[in-house]
């Protein structure tokens, strides 16, 4: 698979995503400077975590105007696989590729720690290597991960099974105490209606190697790899 | 400013003494103008010139087979094999953080990061050592929150993980907190960049942020003591912009990957003045700069302001002549301001022009290297004997050991720092194998099988009671922390925080501490490769405890052998390496339970220390160890508690049996005897581990077994042993240790 990792000014998980796909999973990775306007020959695009443009304004609010985002939209509209992690998720929201917004964490602090998320839909291009209801341990690291959207949109993404990950306890209970940032309905990650764009706050690239003590996040990347070239997963959502 | 009249008040404002001014007159052969006076003031400040400390710093051991770059450059560098170097340094930002905690701490992080990537290294880890007053003080809570969010705000945005650190709370730091920041980067050994202005005719290029009027005279401010009016110095604190620094980092590393760069230095304290004169001085050249070409934030800035601005995120480099366009192109790619502002000359002088008109002309060496040096008088304080006198007989022994242990766990110095480190991104760059909360942070080195262990440490109270022994212990304990993860120490950086050097008792502390550092480093065979001195840490005439902070780097040859401090498995045997003595002086127990900070610090034998550490490293390398934890603040009882409850995955209890051996009960449980390490090992290898230890001449004893949901410590001995049993549920222990800090901050 050929993966493009977008580099915005202020991206800081770009190398980590490159390392996972290239060094750990043995894929071809191309770093894409944010001023590029064409994404040629790529099978998937990663919008990595970080502080694009310093996030001095609302997170992701400036990055969405980067020249590359036009190309990312075009890529996604043609069914290309896009994953936005943390700041990448925030950018996807600002760019309108995913519905909703990010608010400040309820604690008002940056939070970096392991959390548990429950896989709500395992029949997707990002989760097909997981079991439905499986609990993954993946770290978060953000100040603005408090997902919010209006009730109608929420109803829609739930009905469409677009909510892929929800914060939960170690044994899979979705409770207020297991919610680290106040996120609506404990949402940790959602995809678009076409099932080819994922945004998630937890960092699977930080939990994908045994030397770091946790390989749960690897399932998400392996799902992307295994779905590639499988038309039944590339078409509309399964189970809708 | 032509008709400048040098008055006593003007010199006082610039913190220059009469003798120093006379020396300036000799050097220039004339009176300085306003700009030159400002430049001398900044470069000859304590902060930049090390004038009170330099003759003593020379005694420190700085060489060794691994040393690639010792002190004197932006940072030190140590060979870690595989063609790579660890580049590291620690620096203080105490004064600015007291005046404005968020920006003071943030720009401290920014400054140390620049020191590292200026050398050609990509920063991969930050740590910090903080000192605050007690948390019952509202201003301390404000300072703690501000400093932590400042460190988080800068480091997180930069994408450099803050992987560890330590915090001590003591009222002595209430009006003079310490904020020391450590950074480590990885560079190719043959691609280390230095701050040198080589090659006459080569262009001097400025890049990064524009120069503004912020931070003027920051270096001079940092060389002053404080009073109630400290808040008025807020304008001398700079404002950080981590986003620009991130661009600067990537631009620098991209520039360094090519071959157009000759030398590079960041503009830290004393801004353009220090970078220009130090780069020229190191190489014996001169530089000529046109100030009209310096990118500026606002019009009509005077040469004085341009040269003394401490605006952040700025760099000065010397490139190869004819390669200017390449440099400019890379800087522009990263949206940075860039301008050729001068040339390297052979005059040995820093010559500043404004629109072609010379506005300052000073020999570079005079500014950078020939500042004043003082051998300041030193003598022990009158109260020293009183401090050290601790009559054990007048201290009642512990009656309720459970209560004493819980009180210690409530002490924020001992309590979990989770509230702090969860605000730091400690995992970005995906190298963090051991996260904050163990004795040392451990990071794998990508592309190798190795890992680096990092620790920062210092017990200021020990240093107050005995500066020599306290400094020795700081080195020993830092190395012990590394040993507990299986790492061999390979290099040290220090950050020497002391009071006003014009007080003989402060100089006495300083000189003795240097001796202690020297002896301990020599004994443990680890060189000091970089460092920083922060003096004048006093407010309202009260000096801080002498606090020679140590940052140490250790190497683990096989990364997957690294261990952590918490128990792993029920049934494992608990083994104590080292011996417990009656060491109550200067302990946290004495402070928390008896409200005394008195006595002599624990005795440290460097021979024993070395043997205990070597034995631990060997056992870990052989894969015999499940967990290893240093016994320090709060003694054996606190160390055992931490083994039980500090792991994030699970909590495991323990049943421990200790012989009283004629000791006081409190000394046995809470004394801080040095050179002790708690191991847990699989039961079937316990005998073997004990034999290895005894063969190595290390005192070792099996003291208990891991398991259950309680910590039980029973003491054998005469009747005196009754009443000092510890028996507490892990949930109760965690409720104190885990939540003391959020509770003190009203955020539990």
Image (spheres, helix red, strand yellow):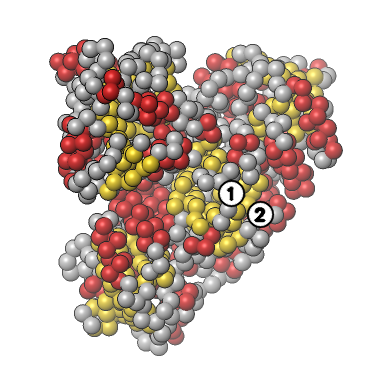
Counting residues from the N terminus, which is met first, the one under dot 2 or under dot 1? 2
- Location of residue B581 (image quadrant): top right
Q: Looking at the picture, how far across and down is residue A103, in whole percent?
A: 24, 28
Q: Are marks 2 and 1 in contact (CB under 8 Å)?
A: yes
Q: Chain of mark 2?
A: B
* Category of crowding for the residue at label 1, using alpha-carbon neighbours closer than 10 angstroms: few (below 14), some (14–19), many (at least 20): many
Which secondary structure, mark 2?
A: loop
Residue topped by disc 2: B526
Which secondary structure, mark 1?
A: strand
Horizontal arrangement in the rendering, residue B541 relative to residue B619 (left or right): left
| Picture residue at 28% right of the left edge, 39% below the top | A42
Q: Chain of mark 1?
A: B
Q: Is residue B649 above or below residue B215?
A: above
Residue topped by disc 1: B552
Q: Could you tell me which quadrant the C terminus of chain B lies in?
A: top left
Nearer to me, B245 or B369: B245
- Location of residue B291 (image quadrant): bottom left
| Picture residue at 18% right of the left edge, 69% below the top | B300
Nearer to me, B502 or B474: B474
Q: Are marks 2 and 1 on the same chain?
A: yes
Nearer to me, B12 or B51: B51
| Picture residue at 63% right of the left edge, 17% below the top | B653
Nearer to me, B471 or B399: B471
Q: Could you tell me which quadrant the N terminus of chain B lies in?
A: bottom left
* Category of crowding for the residue at label 2, using alpha-carbon neighbours closer than 10 angstroms: few (below 14), some (14–19), many (at least 20): many
Q: Is residue B533 visible in the rendered structure shown here? A: no
Q: Between marks 2 and 1, how big is the CA–CA gap?
A: 9 Å
Q: Is residue B339 above or below residue B355?
A: above
Horizontal arrangement in the rendering, residue B324 relative to residue B88 (left or right): left
| Picture residue at 34% right of the left edge, 25% below the top | A227
Horizontal arrangement in the rendering, residue B1 relative to residue B504 (left or right): left
Q: Looking at the picture, how far across and down is residue A198, in whole percent?
A: 28, 27
């Amino acid at each position: 698979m050929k993966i493009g990792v977008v580099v915005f000014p202020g991206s800081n998980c770009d190398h980590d995503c490159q390392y996972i796909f290239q060094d750990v999973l043995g894929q071809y990775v191309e770093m894409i400077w944010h001023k590029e306007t064409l994404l040629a020959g790529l099978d998937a695009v990663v919008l990595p975590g970080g502080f694009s443009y310093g996030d001095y304004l609302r997170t992701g609010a400036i990055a969405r105007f980067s020249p590359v985002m036009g190309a990312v939209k075009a890529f996604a509209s043609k069914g290309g696989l896009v994953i936005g992690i943390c700041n990448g998720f925030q950018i996807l929201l600002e760019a309108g590729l995913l519905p909703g917004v990010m608010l400040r964490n309820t604690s008002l602090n940056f939070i970096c720690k392991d959390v548990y998320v429950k896989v709500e839909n395992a029949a997707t291009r990002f989760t097909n290597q997981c079991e439905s209801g499986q609990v993954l341990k993946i770290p978060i690291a953000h100040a603005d991960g408090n997902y919010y959207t209006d009730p109608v949109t929420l109803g829609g993404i739930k009905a469409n099974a677009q909510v892929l990950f929800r914060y939960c306890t170690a044994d899979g209970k979705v409770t207020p105490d297991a919610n680290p940032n106040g996120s609506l309905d404990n949402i940790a990650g959602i995809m678009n209606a076409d099932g080819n764009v994922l945004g998630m706050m937890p960092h699977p690239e930080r939990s994908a190697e045994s030397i770091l003590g946790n390989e749960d996040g690897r399932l998400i990347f392996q799902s992307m790899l295994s779905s590639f070239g499988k038309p039944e997963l590339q078409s509309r959502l399964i189970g809708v | 400013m032509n008709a400048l009249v040098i008055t006593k008040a003007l010199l006082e404002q610039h913190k220059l003494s009469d003798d120093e001014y006379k020396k300036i007159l000799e050097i220039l052969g004339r009176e300085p103008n306003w700009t030159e006076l400002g430049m001398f003031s900044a470069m000859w400040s304590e902060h930049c010139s090390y004038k009170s400390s330099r003759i003593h710093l020379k005694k420190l051991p700085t060489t060794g087979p691994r040393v690639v770059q010792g002190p004197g450059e932006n940072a030190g560098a140590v060979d870690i094999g595989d063609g790579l170097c660890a580049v590291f340094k620690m620096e203080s930002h105490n004064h600015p953080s007291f005046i404005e905690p968020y920006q003071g701490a943030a720009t401290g992080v920014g400054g140390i990061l620049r020191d590292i990537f200026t050398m050609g290294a990509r920063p991969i880890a930050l740590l910090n050592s903080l000192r605050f007053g007690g948390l019952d003080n509202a201003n301390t809570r404000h300072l703690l929150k501000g400093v932590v969010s400042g460190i988080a705000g800068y480091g997180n945005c930069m994408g450099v993980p803050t992987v560890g650190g330590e915090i001590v709370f003591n009222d002595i730091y209430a009006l003079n907190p310490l904020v020391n920041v450590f950074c480590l980067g990885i560079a190719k050994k043959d691609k280390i960049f230095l701050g040198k202005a080589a090659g006459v005719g080569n262009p001097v290029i400025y890049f990064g942020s524009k120069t503004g009027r912020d931070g003027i005279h920051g270096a001079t401010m940092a060389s002053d003591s404080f009073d109630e009016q400290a808040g008025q110095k807020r304008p001398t604190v700079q404002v950080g912009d981590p986003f620009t620094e991130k661009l600067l980092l990537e631009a620098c590393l991209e520039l360094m990957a090519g071959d157009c760069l000759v030398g590079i230095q960041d503009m830290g304290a004393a801004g353009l003045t220090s970078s220009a004169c130090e780069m020229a001085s190191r190489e014996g050249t001169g530089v000529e700069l046109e100030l009209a070409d310096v990118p500026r934030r606002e019009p009509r800035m005077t040469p004085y302001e341009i040269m003394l601005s401490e605006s952040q995120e700025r760099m000065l480099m010397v490139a190869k002549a004819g390669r200017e366009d390449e440099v400019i192109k890379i800087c522009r790619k990263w949206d940075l301001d860039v301008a050729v502002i001068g040339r390297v000359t052979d005059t040995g002088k820093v010559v500043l022009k404004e629109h072609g008109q010379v506005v300052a002309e000073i020999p570079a060496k005079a500014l950078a290297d020939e500042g004043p040096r003082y051998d300041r008088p030193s003598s022990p304080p009158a109260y020293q004997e009183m401090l050290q006198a601790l009559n054990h007989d007048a201290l009642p022994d512990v009656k309720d050991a459970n209560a004493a242990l819980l009180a210690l766990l409530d002490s924020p110095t001992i309590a979990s720092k989770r509230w702090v480190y969860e605000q730091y991104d400690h995992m970005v760059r995906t190298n963090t194998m051991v996260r904050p909360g163990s004795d040392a942070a451990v990071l794998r080195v990508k592309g190798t099988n190795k890992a680096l262990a990092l620790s920062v440490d210092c017990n200021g109270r020990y240093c107050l009671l005995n500066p020599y022994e306290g400094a020795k212990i700081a080195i020993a304990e830092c190395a012990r922390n590394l040993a507990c993860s299986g790492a061999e120490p390979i290099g040290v950086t220090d950050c020497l925080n002391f009071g006003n050097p014009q007080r003989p008792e402060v100089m006495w502390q300083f000189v003795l501490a240097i001796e202690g550092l020297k002896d301990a480093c020599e004994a443990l065979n680890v060189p000091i490769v970089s460092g920083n001195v922060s003096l004048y840490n006093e407010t309202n005439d009260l000096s801080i405890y002498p606090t020679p902070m140590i940052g140490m780097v250790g190497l683990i040859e096989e990364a997957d052998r690294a261990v952590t401090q918490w128990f792993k498995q029920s049934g494992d045997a608990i083994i104590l390496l080292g011996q417990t003595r009656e060491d109550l002086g200067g302990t946290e127990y004495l402070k928390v339970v008896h409200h005394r900070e008195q006595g002599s610090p624990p005795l440290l034998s460097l021979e024993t220390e070395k043997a205990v550490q070597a034995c631990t490293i060997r056992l870990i390398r052989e894969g015999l160890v499940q967990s290893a934890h240093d016994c320090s603040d709060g003694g054996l009882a606190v160390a055992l508690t931490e083994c039980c409850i500090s792991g994030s995955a699970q909590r495991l209890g323990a049943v421990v049996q200790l012989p009283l051996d004629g000791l006081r009960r409190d000394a046995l449980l809470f004394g801080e005897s040095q050179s002790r390490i708690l191991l847990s090992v699989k039961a079937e290898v316990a005998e073997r581990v004990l034999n290895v230890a005894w063969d190595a001449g290390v005192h070792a004893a099996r003291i208990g077994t891991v398991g259950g949901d309680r910590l039980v410590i029973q003491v054998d001995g005469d009747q005196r042993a009754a009443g000092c049993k510890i028996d507490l549920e892990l949930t109760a222990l965690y409720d104190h240790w885990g939540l003391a800090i959020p509770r003190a901050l009203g955020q539990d």
